[in-house]
Image (tube, rainbow, N blue to C red):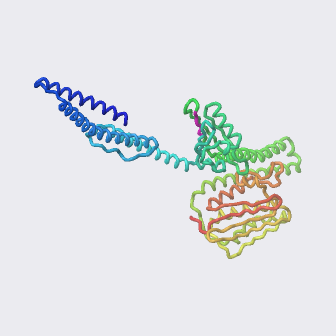
Amino acid sequence: MHNQWQQTVRLLALENGLILGLGLVVLQRFSPIKWSAALVGALILAWFILAAIEAGFVWFQQKERQKTIDRMEAKLRQMSSQQFPPHILLPQSDPLYSLSQAVNQLESYQRNQTRRAELQEKELMMIMRYLPVGVMVIDHHRQVQLSNPAMGDLLQQSINAVAHLYTKDIQLYALTKVIEDTITTQHNQRATITLTPAPNTQVVEATTVYIQNSRAHFQIVLMLYDITEVYMIEQMQDDFVSNASHELKTPITAIAGFTETLLDGAKDDPATLTQFLQIISDESQRLIDLIQDVLSLSRIRAQSTTTLSVQTVKLKPLIDQEKTLLQQTSDHQHLTVITDIDPAIQVTADVQKLSQVVKNLLSNAIKYNRPNGRVTISATADTEHWYLRVRDNGIGISADDQQRIFERFYRASPSRSQQVVSGTGLGLAIVKELVTAMQGQIAVTSQRGVGTTMTVTLPLKPSE
């Protein structure tokens, strides 16, 4: 401002000198001037007074204009640091009015853009927070810039919000390889990765997106989709096809083989004929039982959304009836079946479905027991549910098998050749479907060589 003021003073002095000289020339033209020291002094004094008045006026204007410029400069600095001071208001006659309006409009535009960006960021963070897909953004320094809670849940650890190397959160080689392959090839990658092995299996589909910001800067967006349920369903489908094929093939092969043997001449031996016919009859019955179980399972699943036919029934007589039907089997193994239920207990349930649940659970407890073993059936209740427990001291179920015993055709024996009990492998699958249809749950507690306890939880007042 000091240099501008010096320049302005020089211009004013030159301007006043020219005006005074021009005025003297005009006066000299029309009437000769008698010069004297007094006249010259008066002219010089007038020139100084005129220059001082004009300089004062110009100085005041320059000072006010500089204040406005300083305000604009300060305003622009604040805008560059995302601060938005009030608008600069000037009269329309001010020379800086147009400039102030342009600065004000720029501030309004920047404020709106900033608010829009903040709103979009909040919306993005809200979406990221509740997105069921794990998301992580990794920069060219291999540092995590952003992640959502779902990613922390999938990786089973808390992810720091401060930028850090992604290897602090991801130690699994398969997942690290996907990220490094993305950086090396500069192409998107996709892979199916098992984060947690059995029995608590967790499988994800890892997808990376490579984003090139500039020649030296890039970002990688890592997304993890939890496909554990889909993976388990696919495994169950594969096992179902394999097990169903085996269960159907075994009796059919036996029937075909013994029939062919009889046709080749074995029918002429009465003893062999009787033995082979009995085997064919047993295998045919096994095949019939298998088909009936499959049909029952399909029928239960098809009717699971229909209304229940509930009624109040005394529990002990219902269980005693199923116990009587299996008495011959339990006596054959010299088992003791104990019913520890108060005769006065009444429950509200679908009697037909409940009877089938009791029958299958009791049949399993007998079949997978040891000679001279014991089976105990008990029932308790609380304010909202009642519980049916079938406990045995038989061969038990391993921890790995307990995760899958309710699957169709699944057999807990480690190999089919070692199965000591015949069956279709559908009994517990049918029980689970029936219990689910009755709005209940079933749980298993077991230990190899100690025994098994099946607990069915049903509501006291099921909705019809």
Q: Is residue 43 above or below residue 384?
A: above
Q: Is residue 200 above or below residue 71?
A: below
Instruction: Tell me the magenta residue range.
Output: 217-221
Tell me, yes or no, whether the highlighted magenta stretch contains residue 220.
yes
Nearest the camera: 57 or 335? Answer: 57
Q: Is residue 192 above or below residue 306?
A: above
Expressed as whole percent of the image width and height from the top left, the position of residue 328 reads 80, 64
Expressed as whole percent of the image width and height from the top left, the position of residue 152 reads 63, 49
Q: What is the magenta segment's predominant secondary structure?
A: strand
Tell me, yes or no, whether the highlighted magenta stretch contains residue 448.
no
- Report the residue that reaches farthest toward the bottom: 344
Image quadrant containing the C terminus? bottom right
Image quadrant containing the N terminus? top left
Name the quadrant containing residue 225. Answer: top right
Expressed as whole percent of the image width and height from the top left, the position of residue 302 reads 60, 54
Do we see residue 430 in this rendering?
A: yes
Taking the spot 89% from the left edge, 51% from the top edge, the residue there is 271
- Report the residue that reaches farthest toward the left: 31
Nearest the camera: 236 or 174? Answer: 174
Taking the spot 86% from the left edge, 62% from the top edge, the residue there is 371
Nearest the camera: 429 or 69? Answer: 69
Q: Is residue 371 above or below residue 153?
A: below
Expressed as whole percent of the image width and height from the top left, the position of residue 458 reads 64, 65
Name the quadrant containing residue 92. Answer: top left
Taking the image as shown, residue 66 lies to the left or right of residue 194, namely left
Q: How many marks do you count on the picture? A: 0
Taking the spot 85% from the left edge, 41% from the top edge, the residue there is 264
Do we see residue 285 in this rendering?
A: no
- Report the residue that reaches farthest toward the front: 37
